[in-house]
Amino acid sequence: MGKFSDETCEALYDLSLDGGPDEQCGDVSEIGEWYGLMVNTGIDGAEHAILFENGQGFVDYTVYDTEERARGEFSRVEAAIASEAGE
């Protein structure tokens, strides 16, 4: 798989390039982390997910059972990144 944790991860990444995630935060080149919220993906087992890429180019994801949980966690990630950046 290389930079992806598994085939689902690669499918989510490809989808993120095709239309972009619903929301995103972070920047790999500036802070070494990027997160993309993806809801209603149409990918079995990963309908709602947060995709993550680190500064070394490795990509992983976390799946949530509802859109609300995915959005809630994404809000926490955004807040953490803003806090680290001093915003």
Image (cartoon, grey):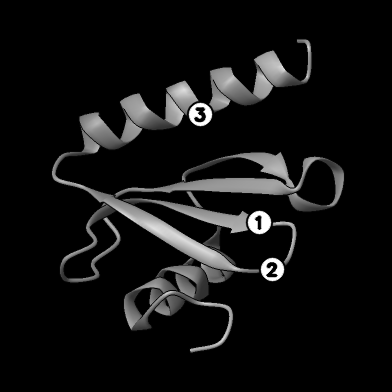
Q: Which residue is mark 2?
A: 57
Query: Farthest residue toward the top?
Result: 87
* Residue type for callout 3: Val
* Residue type for callout 2: Gly
Circle 2 sits in a helix, a strand or a loop, which is it?
loop
Q: Horizontal and vertical percent for residue 4?
A: 50, 77
Q: Horizontal and vertical percent for residue 33?
A: 67, 46
Give the residue drawn at x 45%, y 78%: 10
Q: Is the Cβ of the residue at disc 1 closer than 8 Å to that at disc 2?
A: yes
Q: Is the Cβ of the residue at disc 3 closer than 8 Å to that at disc 1?
A: no
Q: Horizontal and vertical percent for residue 69?
A: 23, 31
Q: Which residue is mark 3?
A: 77
How far is disc 1 from disc 2 in space, using C-alphas?
Answer: 5 Å
> Where on the picture, by quarter, is residue 31?
top right
Q: Which residue is mark 1?
A: 54
Q: What quarter of the picture does the C terminus occupy?
A: top right
Query: Farthest residue toward the right?
Result: 30
Choose the circle earlier in sequence order: 3 or 2: 2
- 44 left or right of 77? left
How packed mark 3 is, by other alpha carbons closer than 10 Å (few <14, some 14-19, many 20 or more), is some
Task: Give above or below for 11 relative to 46.
Answer: below
Q: Nearer the viewer, residue 43 or 74?
A: 74
- 15 left or right of 69? right
* Residue type for callout 1: Asn
How packed mark 1 is, by other alpha carbons closer than 10 Å (few <14, some 14-19, many 20 or more), is some
Q: Horizontal and vertical percent for residue 70?
A: 30, 37
